Image: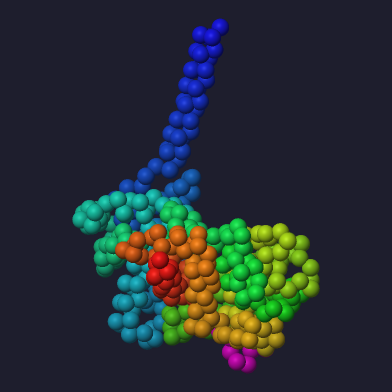
Amino acid sequence: MKVLERQSQRVSRWMICTALLALALAASAQTQQVSLQEIVTPSTVILKDGRPVIFALHGFIEFRSLAELFPYIESQTRRWPGGITDEERRSLARELLRRGIESRVVSMADERPLEALLTHTREELRQAIALVKEPMPTGYADAFLAVQEKWKHSVNCWSASSSLPGRVLSNWYPIAEGIQLYGATYDSTEHFWQAVKYHPDTTLTELTGLLGLFEQKDWRPWIARLDGDPKVYLPNAYAVEFLRHNLVPERLHWFRDELGRHGLQVDDRARVVQQRGATPFHFSAFEEKVLWGDLADLFHMVYAFSAADDPLRKNLAERHFDAIYLGDKRMEFISEEFGSMMLEIWRVKFLQMPRFGEVIRSIPMEIRLEHFLNDGDSPDIPIPIYVRYLSQIRDLARAQH
């Protein structure tokens, strides 16, 4: 009997191991590696789970392949006849090409392109590009080499980073015990950053009222004014594309529906409901960004880019979307003063909370801290300033020890 039991146990273990191996092989087959040659070939459409892996410029202008990117770059260089110089056109083309390649490689949906780039040498990358038989724009190889060099020495600090410290450094990282900032407790630094964009007195009724006014307006001429001036569009490309994306009727309806989906009352104050209450994590960090954050950014940016005599600008000012209000401070939304608030909240997270200070100190100084998300940016704190502050906080945390 004992012999039969031992045989039965061996068979059971064998069956379990076989099943696990089959699952591992199936997972491997579904996520096969992407070769370096495929990455550098412009026509390649990378598939994951049978769907194209999309990348973008300015967060919202999407492409499936680098070959699709090239005509867009060409159209942008011809967009403003007489509005920019020939050198500015060439510079714009180089910048869009590099950003597009970086967005393709540093994907938010698929790590395989970056893996392919980082597991080959600079010379192997040159050789792979030399084998490409398809049309390539001027500077194609240089852009790829620059992206490879940058990411061989960087960690992307965002919520789905392949690096655990990179995830912890994200504003989206949930803080189980909460974080005390300016007299209130928040579930993460992201919760604070988005909540503070609302005046303490702004209610849900006022938000839905503004959305009703936005839904009545034809935004096409308003967007066309921003598009038509290169001096406005080029330094604010992400903001304009963000506004274009969010000022369509379907998106405005979505904001209204989402506000009504969370069991909130009409007289609830927007900033307060994002703070930690009796139940932690009423809103996830994702909801903080795509609902509360995007809605506040929409109101603040419409105010910032509207003409002084636009009646809607007055409506937004009455609801306090003319600035950021925190205590006795009044800060312009697109301003260095407001952006510097990020440094202040990180002082609490990384300098006053030992477990987070330990994480940021663990990243070697030769590794650059970066924040790259689908070539998106943020008018409230531009990415270059964001990563500069993050590096500054690492310096301060290391100086503590």
Q: Nearer the viewer, residue 359 or 55?
A: 359
Q: Nearer the viewer, residue 269 or 169?
A: 169
Quadrant of the rendering where the N terminus is positioned: top right
Instruction: Say if 301 sits above or below 292 in the image.
Output: below
Q: In the current view of this chain or complex, which residue is farthest to the front?
A: 401
Quadrant of the rendering where the C terminus is positioned: bottom left
| 175 horizontally vs 237: left or right | right
| 276 horizontally vs 348: left or right | right
Provide residue 177's location: percent of width, then percent of height. 61, 60
Q: In the current view of this chain or complex, which residue is farthest to the bottom?
A: 309
Residue at 56% over, 75% down: 243
Q: Is the magenta stretch mostly helix, strand or loop?
A: loop
Residue 366 in which image quadrant: bottom left
Residue 206 within the segment the image draws in magenta: no
Q: Which colour scheme is used?
A: rainbow
Residue 310 within the segment the image draws in magenta: yes
Provide residue 202's location: percent of width, then percent of height. 71, 78
Provide residue 297's location: percent of width, then percent of height. 59, 75
Residue at 58% over, 89% down: 307
Provide residue 176's location: percent of width, then percent of height. 60, 57
Instruction: Say if 3 sits above or below 352 in the image.
Output: above
Is residue 136 among what the camera can see?
A: no
| 98 horizontally vs 336: left or right | left
Residue 367 in which image quadrant: bottom left
Residue at 48% over, 45% down: 50
Q: Give the tally of numbered discs.
A: 0
Q: Give the range drawn in magenta.
A: 305-311
Is residue 338 among what the camera can see?
A: yes
Q: Nearer the viewer, residue 357 or 281?
A: 357
Residue at 35% over, 72% down: 95
